[in-house]
Image: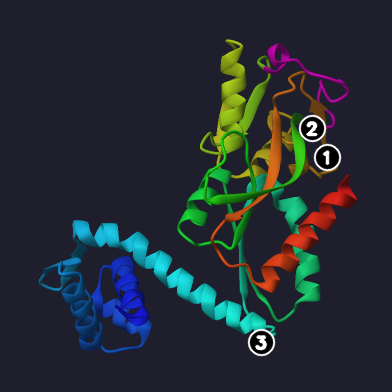
C-alpha cells in the first residue's frame, strides 16, 4: 500500500469522479484507475461501486476513508518534522476560530503574520462544535474555541481565559444603565440571538430551561456581527460572550447567573505533530492572554 495510492483514493472519494480527481491530481485517468485498482486488490475488496462513468463508495470504502486520512496525515507530519529539523521557514498553519473569539484572535493573527511573513495562514471561522468536527477530520492544526463539559480523549486542551455571557444593548436603550439583569428580566426583552446550533446558544437555552423560563427569541441569525448590527438599531437585545463586543454604540450588562460563562481553550489533536510555526502561534495567543488579565 503506497502513500500516493491513499492520496488518489481520498481525492476520488471526495469528488466521486475519477475524471475530476485525475485532473486535480495532474495525472491521467488511466493512472488513477490503475492505482486504485491495485489498492483494491491488496485490500481484497472493492472500495468503489462503478456504474458507467459514475462511482460511489462501497461500505468498505466508507470505512477505509478515515484510516486513509490518518495514514496520509501521519506521513505529512513526518515530512514536516524533517523540514523543521532542517530549519526550513516554510509551511502553512490552519487555525479554526469560534465566531465570538474573532476580536481576540485578530490581535494574535496580526502579530504572527508580522513575525513570520513566509508562513501561509488559513483561518476558518465556525461554531465550537463545528471546529471539533473539523479537528477530527484533520482539517485544522488547532482551534481557538469554547469548551465546557467532558473532555474528548484524543484532544489536547490548553485553557486561555474565561469570559462571561452578557446582555448587549444599544447605549441609548432603556436598560443601558442597569448594573445587573436577572434571567426573569431578560425574558421580558425582545431578543435576537445566534442560531441555536452555536454552542453558546445551547448554554443559553439550557440555563433558561433549568429555571423554567422562556425568553423571547424574536430572531435567530447564524452570524454574530449581524446580531450586533440588529442590536444597534435599539429594537432588540442579545446575549453574547463579552469578548465579542467592542462597538462603542453598544453596552454590555452583566447577568445575575454565574453559570453563564464560556471557557476559551486552544484545542488540538494529541497525536498530531506540531510544527515550529504552530508552537509560535500558540505562544502569541498565550502572551495575549496574560496581557488581557
Residue 70 higher or lower than 144, as above or below: below
Q: Magenta residues: mostly which secondary structure? A: loop
Q: Position of residue 31 (x, y in %)?
A: 24, 88
Can residue 74 be seen from the camera position used here?
Answer: yes
Q: Position of residue 235 (x, y in %)?
A: 70, 28
| Label 1 neighbour load within 10 Å: few <14, some 14-19, many 20+ | some
Q: Does the CB distance between marks 1 and 2 fall below 8 Å?
A: yes
Which label's residue is closer to the chain start, 3 or 2? 3
Task: Report whether 179 appears left or right of 77.
Answer: right
Q: Please tell me how many numbered marks the rendered image carries.
A: 3
Give the numbered dot on residue 249: 1
* C-alpha separation, residue under disc 1 versus residue under disc 2: 6 Å
Task: Report whether 134 appears left or right of 158.
Answer: left
Quadrant housing the N terminus? bottom left
Secondary structure beneath label 2 = strand
Residue depicted at 59% across the width and 82% down the height: 82
Give the numbered dot on residue 86: 3
Q: Disc 3 vs disc 1: which is toward the camera?
A: 3
Residue 34 higher or lower than 293, as above or below: below
Q: Report if residue 144 lies within the magenta region.
A: no
Q: Does the CB distance between marks 3 and 2 fall below 8 Å?
A: no
Give the numbered dot on residue 258: none
| Label 3 neighbour load within 10 Å: few <14, some 14-19, many 20+ | few
Residue that mark 2 sits on = 170
- Magenta range: 169-186
Amino acid at each position: 500500500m503506497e502513500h500516493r495510492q491513499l492520496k488518489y483514493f481520498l481525492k476520488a472519494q471526495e469528488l466521486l469522479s475519477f475524471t475530476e480527481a485525475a485532473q486535480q491530481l495532474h495525472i491521467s485517468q488511466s493512472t488513477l484507475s490503475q492505482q486504485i485498482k491495485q489498492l483494491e486488490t491488496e485490500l481484497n475488496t472493492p472500495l468503489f461501486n462503478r456504474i458507467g462513468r459514475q462511482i460511489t463508495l462501497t461500505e468498505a470504502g466508507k470505512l477505509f476513508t478515515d484510516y486513509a486520512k490518518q495514514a496520509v496525515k501521519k506521513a505529512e507530519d513526518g515530512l514536516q518534522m524533517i523540514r523543521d529539523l532542517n530549519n526550513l521557514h516554510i509551511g502553512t498553519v490552519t487555525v479554526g476560530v469560534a465566531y465570538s473569539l474573532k476580536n481576540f484572535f485578530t490581535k494574535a493573527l496580526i502579530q504572527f503574520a508580522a513575525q513570520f511573513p513566509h508562513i501561509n495562514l488559513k483561518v476558518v471561522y465556525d461554531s465550537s462544535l463545528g471546529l471539533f468536527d473539523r479537528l477530527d477530520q484533520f482539517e485544522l492544526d488547532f482551534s481557538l474555541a469554547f469548551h465546557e463539559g467532558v473532555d474528548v480523549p484524543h484532544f489536547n486542551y490548553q485553557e486561555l481565559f474565561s469570559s462571561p455571557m452578557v446582555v448587549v444593548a444599544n447605549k441609548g436603550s432603556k436598560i443601558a444603565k442597569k448594573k445587573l439583569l436577572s434571567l426573569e428580566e431578560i425574558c421580558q426583552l425582545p431578543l435576537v440571538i445566534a442560531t441555536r446550533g452555536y454552542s453558546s446558544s445551547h448554554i443559553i437555552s439550557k440555563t433558561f430551561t433549568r429555571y423554567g423560563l422562556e425568553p423571547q427569541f424574536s430572531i435567530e441569525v447564524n452570524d454574530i456581527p449581524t446580531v450586533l448590527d440588529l442590536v444597534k438599531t435599539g429594537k432588540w437585545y442579545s446575549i453574547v460572550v463579552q469578548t465579542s463586543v467592542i462597538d462603542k454604540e453598544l453596552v454590555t450588562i452583566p447577568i445575575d447567573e454565574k453559570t453563564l460563562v464560556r471557557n476559551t481553550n486552544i484545542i488540538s489533536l494529541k497525536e498530531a505533530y506540531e510544527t515550529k510555526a504552530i508552537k509560535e502561534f500558540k505562544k502569541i495567543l498565550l502572551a495575549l492572554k496574560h496581557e488581557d488579565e
